[in-house]
Image: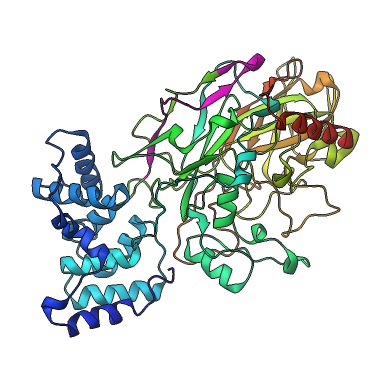
Amino acid sequence: MRAIVERSWFRRDWGRAKARPTTARRPRIGVEVLDDRLMLCATPAPLPGIGSHVRNVVIQTYETLVGRKPGVAEQNHLLRVEAVAGQNWLVPAIVATRAFYDRTAQGNPNGYVTLAAATLDQFPSKAEVAQLTRHVVIHDAKPQVLKQVVLALNPPGSKSPYPTGQPNPLYKLLKKNVLINADYYSNTPQILGASLGFTHILGVPGLSGTTTADELRARSAGGAWETLSSPTASSASMRAYTSDAALSGIATNYGYPVKYTDGFPIEFSWPVLPSTVAGNDFRVVLNTGQVITPLAASITPNLDYNERSTVVILGYFGNRIAPGQPGAIYPVKLEIARSRNPLKLVGPGGVVVSAAGLTYGDGSTPMTAYNPGSGPKLVAAKLSVMSTAGEAAPRPFSSELPNDGTALYGPAAQYRLRLFTSGGFSPDGVRSLYPTDFSQFFRIETVDASGVVRWLTQTGVPYQLPNGTITVVGLADLGPAQPSYNDSYVEDHNNQIDIILSGDQAAIATIKAVQIPASGGYAPFYNPGGPGNNPTPGVTYSQPGPSQTEPVINALSNPMTVTYIAPSRSAPKAIRASSREHRSSG
């Protein structure tokens, strides 16, 4: 747990409170919030009436977490807490009730502390859980004590407010309207996938390197920390060790230094118009009925000019408890908001349309990678002639370039089978996927004119088909080429993986599907919320992805790409950068 708990918090504050006369005691400000005491400082505003949407959300949230509807007095208390402290304090206020202790945690002190932490998406150590449990036992789970436990787990300031002011200057580079040879996957705009990928690990205060202190910070935030064994481990970057992101990195890539946020990737069938990407473009509906407006949004990590069909939103969208279990909070629907400046998509021929009104999810099915069987998936796959057009990014964001097929394999890169994923694919949640990893994770289905099915399972093997040969060369759109790959290697962890192919086009055209078997000698994929190779005991990580067969879109004759460059001083630079990339790798 973070330093705010300080392990001696109860001995220090509780002891001082007992030592002072009752009239002199001043409760902590967080306790005042949970007790409604701040409302006594002014005339309370009228509460939302019976049947109002705000009251109904409070009722649904309480019923979701406690298992019964709250009485009117309980509703009013929670409405006042929410009015004073904001939406982020509704769930903590419910967790701090005796009803949650008695019904959800079944009156078990240790069970209450453990479940309260999981519901609030916090990660205390065993020692801290034991200390909080003793406090509950000693004081007989009195309401004030439960509030203190909640505040120790989830103190005021542990979540970022909605950001204001100007965003980070580097982030503005990602808002430039530059799309070059960007993929689209259907003739109509739609959301192909959306899900809570991982919680609490984006924007970890103090995280900056690979020291023991950094490992503690990453693990305390609920992240994983990889054990590296390669000879270059001592010089490996922080990303080789953890998927947790530093506050500075979040500010650069998302505009603002929001802390301990969740990552929620959204995949569109058309690339987005970057200047229109903003947190308030989106609404995430939770199983509690709460509707969350994200704190930030970005095309990161899909930075190349020929990608940009994914937006990742940051905010507080739930916890890691599996749906169906007590305390579980998760998204059930995503909506693109209608606003004066809505999110826009760019489609075939450069047509620009508003995405407002698009939705994903049915309002009840869990949309979370913490649901068993709901790890990362393919949302599309497209086969085309190899091209390096658009294989560039703004200079501050190009550290993993060049990584295209031609840069890695030269003239052997004749065709590209681009996989569009629902999240960054990793062998364990931290380790990068290597260009040499095809046979561990994928196989390709071909079907000839007679209906005979053949599977391509190995790289470097010329498969003889009736119409010619196909060779799987390797994977690309990961990181730059190296003589060999080990656990210090870092790739871009974005939503595109390219399978590079060579051979006769007639044979290539018989490719019908790509499969991730995820069993029987094939490994599954994890998103960046996975456990790594040395998980923290007792911490829940995101689930592995399922076995999946994805049909392949044949774009050999029509690549299904769009170029759109809005007039600006940055446009010529973008074109020149992409041209240099093309020449140097062609």
Point out the residue furthest to the bottom here: 19
Query: At 33% across and 55% down in the image, what residue appears?
Result: 119
- Report if residue 245 is visible in the image: no
Q: In the picture, residue 364 is in which quadrant?
A: top left
Q: In the image, is residue 127 above or below residue 175?
A: below
* Left or right of residue 252, residue 152 in this image: left
Q: In the image, is residue 501 above or below residue 107?
A: above
Q: In the image, is residue 519 above or below residue 130?
A: above
Residue sitting nearer the eye, 32 or 40: 40
Residue 415 drawn at (x, y percent): 80, 28
Query: At 75% across and 66% down in the image, what residue appears?
Result: 235
Q: Which quadrant holds the C terminus?
A: top right
Residue 309 drawn at (x, y percent): 60, 30
Q: In the picture, residue 332 is in which quadrant?
A: top left
Q: Which residues are magenta?
A: 330-352
Query: At 54% across and 45% down in the image, what residue appears?
Result: 167
Q: In the picture, residue 302 is in which quadrant?
A: top right
Q: Is residue 76 magenta?
A: no
Residue sitting nearer the eye, 233 or 250: 250
Q: Which quadrant holds the N terminus?
A: bottom left
* Left or right of residue 514, residue 61 in this image: left
Q: In the image, is residue 387 above or below residue 205?
A: above
- Report if residue 344 is visible in the image: yes
Residue 306 drawn at (x, y percent): 70, 30
Residue sitting nearer the eye, 302 or 274: 274
* Left or right of residue 567, residue 112 in this image: left
Q: Is residue 351 magenta?
A: yes
Residue 40 drawn at (x, y percent): 13, 57
Query: At 72% across and 44% down in the image, what residue appears?
Result: 478
Residue sitting nearer the eye, 324 or 84: 84
